[in-house]
Image (cartoon, rainbow, N blue to C red):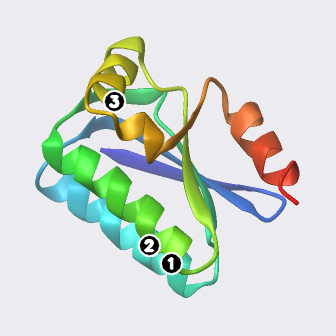
Amino acid sequence: MKLEIRNENDITVIAPAGSLVLGPAEDAMNETVTRLLIEGRTRLIIDLGGVKRIDSSGIECLLLTSQRARDRGGDARLARVSPRFQTLLEISQLTSVLHIYPEVADAVSSYTRQP
């Protein structure tokens, strides 16, 4: 799995590509998130448009990323979630925990709409 990191003002976009599954891919994502949080970058967007496969470990990674960012006063929001994965999140009722946006620009805008 490849990870692209870019900044949009004070928001960090993490764009994984490939599979977000148990093993090196999940480890790389967790290590990246840990580094970003240590650097004080707590307003995160995870662009899932390039993710072709995700397993339960990948879902856990997304949930933990969100929780860790919130614990530091930020958040981790998902963008460009595939329809199939969106359905899985809805069935498992994780859409009540994870903030999901159709495009990265929508997720970025959601941060600026906060009071």
Q: Earlier in the sequence, mark 3 or mark 2?
A: 2
What residue is shown with label 3?
89
Q: CA distance from mark 1 to mark 3?
A: 22 Å
Q: Quadrant of the C terminus?
A: bottom right
Between 94 and 111, the one lying in front of the other is 94
Kindly identify which residue carries mark 2: 68
Q: Earlier in the sequence, mark 1 or mark 3?
A: 1
Disc 1 marks which residue?
A: 71
Q: What residue lies at 87% left-to-right and 48% top-to-bottom?
A: 113
Contact flag, marks 1 and 2 (Cβ < 8 Å): yes
Q: Residue furthest left?
A: 23
Tell me what residue is drawn at x 52 percent, y 70 percent. 69
Q: Within the image, what quadrant is residue 23 found in? A: bottom left
When asked about the image quadrant of residue 114, the answer is bottom right
Secondary structure under the numbered disc 3 in the rendered image = helix
Picture coordinates of residue 95 (x, y %)? 44, 35
* Residue nearest the observer in this picture, 26 or 71: 71
